[in-house]
Image (cartoon, rainbow, N blue to C red):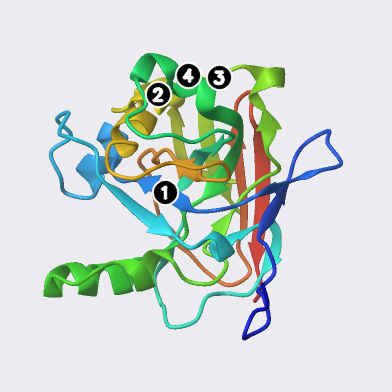
Amino acid sequence: MAHVIEVPPETTLPVEGEAGVFPVRRIWCVGRNYADHAREMGHDPDREPPFFFSKPATAAVPGGTLPFPVQTRDLHHEVEMVVALGKGGRDIPVEQALDHVYGYAIGLDMTRRDIQAEAKKLGRPWELSKGFDQSCPISPIVPAARIGHPARGKIEITVNGKVQQTGDLNQMIWSVPEAIAYLSRYVELLPGDLLMTGTPAGVSAVKPGDLLHGVCEGVGEIKVQYAG
């Protein structure tokens, strides 16, 4: 079928050890999935039902040097383990959820916190604070067939060599299989969907010229430097 405009390029991510690439369909993010981060954002960390927001697929970019985002004076980093789905489904049982996972990566949910704060104050959506261009740097995906399904291990980010966020994957309020199962009740998950699993405490502001280095034990690392 002919298209009436030029077809946009497909967003893909490299896969470690593979010649092929992973096609990104959608990016889902679990909000406040670490108790200590929920507290630092002023919320009760009790095990309430998870909530989700999304970023466009085009927000996903590899690490490296990136331009500093426009329209913000308060850019924050949020380091997260990323789940890449190889199979989709609706109403996925928790005990079968990991069968749908292709692999894992480490990513940064970059957030224009000043825009988010203003949106919250006015009761408006967050999209402009979360889904802006290049707001989701992600490392190469590592297949689960090679590393299994990480449920514990250090996740950390340094800024200019100083540790800003550190935690353990076992501190998630909602585990990876629980989050997949819950989200699949509301949307049909499809191959190519990414799930960002939440961030530990310590989010902080990033300035032009800063070097960010995120590490997720057993998964990988990512480096991002914002152009000065």
Q: Nearer the viewer, mark 4 or mark 2?
A: 2
In three-dimensional space, the C-alpha distance between marks 1 and 3, rounded to whole angstroms, equals 19 Å
Upstream in sequence: badge 4 or badge 2: 4
Q: Nearer the viewer, mark 3 or mark 4?
A: 3
Indicate whether 84 appears above or below 116.
above
The residue beneath circle 1 is: 28
Circle 4 Cα neighbour tier, 10 Å, few/some/many (<14 / 14–19 / ≥20) = few
Circle 1 Cα neighbour tier, 10 Å, few/some/many (<14 / 14–19 / ≥20) = many
Quarter of the rendering occupied by the N terminus: bottom right
The image quadrant that residue 102 belongs to is top right
The residue beneath circle 2 is: 177
Indicate whether 180 appears above or below 52.
above
The answer to the question of whether label 4 and label 1 lie on touching residues, with beta carbons closer than 8 A, is no
Residue at the spot 55% in from the left edge and 19% down from the top edge: 149
Indicate whether 11 appears above or below 133.
above
Upstream in sequence: badge 2 or badge 1: 1
Residue at the spot 43% in from the left edge and 23% down from the top edge: 97
Label 3 SS: loop
The residue beneath circle 3 is: 149
The answer to the question of whether label 3 and label 4 lie on touching residues, with beta carbons closer than 8 A, is yes
